[in-house]
Amino acid sequence: MAGKTFIYVGAEADGLYRKESEDGQWEKLAKGMPPAPQVRAIAIHPSEPKTVFVGTQRGVFRSKDGGDNFERMTMAEGRTVWSLKFHPSDPNTMFLGTEGSEIFKSTDRGENWAHLATISNPDQHQMAFAMRILGIAIEPGNTEQMYAALEVGGAAQSSDGGKNWTIVNKNFAGDVDLLDLHGVAMGGPGSTTAFISNRVGTWRTTDHGQNWQNLNFDQFSEIRYSRGVEVDPTNSNTLYACVGMNFGSEEGGVLQTTDGGDTWHRFDKGVSAVSTTFGIAINEVDPSQVYFCTRKGQVFGTHDSGASWKEHVLPEMAANVKAVACISV
């Protein structure tokens, strides 16, 4: 039975916050963090709920006490971390993605990080920033198979555990709306299906990215720009996708599918998100608990699979909110 649920939210401005779901106030977590931390990725250890990793503009920081204290993990300076991913069957192994499209790997529980690969795409759309890895996914049944979501370079796939990468943009090439990937997820145990998010919605592949199928969010929702997709840890047919009108829109929400992506419906019924949804978290201890955050600082949570919702508004200083995580302790 789940105990207390803790919510973590990361923002580009004003850093990391924590809240117990039943408490009234958010706590800012800063002890051991860099000055003015920019937190864009959060990962909670799969079997140690008080061990929390965050990706910042100064690399990776870890807390062993639920966020009270952080320390910087060993990796090269000058790396801005945008994504963190635990290996699905070996929690001692972790991967991260950076601005600059580098993949780093740790095999000692996140203590030390070594450069594994740099993903390049000569056909990426040129932006004011270097290409970023906004998501990493690992196939549960064959962990040599990996995917990376590139902003704004499309999808990349590896068949050797992340050492070498191939761009798999057959269905995206030449279209910036399709190349602007924001997230990637794999189905659960036994699944070989991968899902990605871009400006027009969510797509899936069953052949390691050789072909991508548009899941046609426009048939199910008036808003379909997607900032991420997450899979229920206990049911690979159930997925959640962030949506909004566009990056800076004043409307957001969450779509859910229970049939592997064939059909979708709005999951966030009864709440009002006033900016695009940028992150979704499913409680691995109790998947009936789902939280999502919006870019402008709203956080909504359900503990009954969407039947009812509670709003947890962040302090005004938290701007450009990028990540949310939750866990029961």
Image: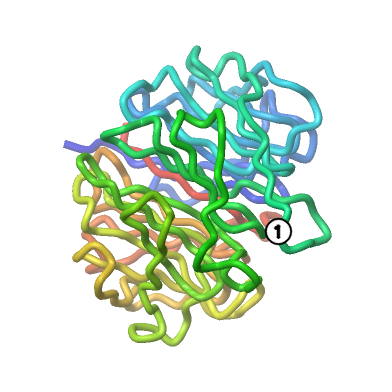
- Describe residue 35's horizontal placement relative to residue 289 as left or right: right
Tell me if residue 174 comes above or below residue 151 in the rendering.
Answer: below
Q: Residues within 10 Å of mark 1 (few under 14, many from 20)?
A: some
Q: Residue 190 placed where, x, y %? A: 20, 41
Q: Residue sitting at 72 percent across and 51 percent down?
A: 131
Residue occupying the far left of the picture: 1
Give the quarter of the image for residue 100: top right
**Marker count (numbered):** 1
Task: Answer with left or right where residue 87 lies relative to residue 170.
Answer: left
Which quadrant of the view contains residue 264?
Answer: bottom left
Which of 223 and 216 lies nearest the eye of the viewer?
216
Residue 56 at x, y percent in the picture: 68, 37
Could you tell me which residue is drawn at 30 percent across and 52 percent down?
A: 193
Residue 312 shows in this picture:
no
Residue 245: x percent and y percent? 55, 80
> Picture quarter containing residue 257?
bottom left
Closer to the camera, 64 or 207? Answer: 207
Left or right for 24, reference 265: right
Q: How is the image coloured?
A: rainbow
| Residue occupied by mark 1 | 124
The one of 13 and 100 positioned closer to us in this rendering: 100
Judging from the image, what secondary structure is the residue with disc 1 in? loop
Which residue is drawn at the image coordinates 46% and 29% (left, top)? 160
Is residue 199 depicted above or below 72 in this figure? below
* Quarter in which the N terminus is drawn: top left
Q: Residue at x 42, y 26 (%)?
A: 50
Q: Quadrant of the C terminus?
A: top left
Is residue 328 visible to us here? Answer: yes
Type of amino acid under label 1: Gln
- Residue 270 vertical placement versus 74 (above, below): below
Q: Is residue 290 above or below residue 109?
A: below
Q: Whole-percent x and y of residue 126?
A: 79, 62
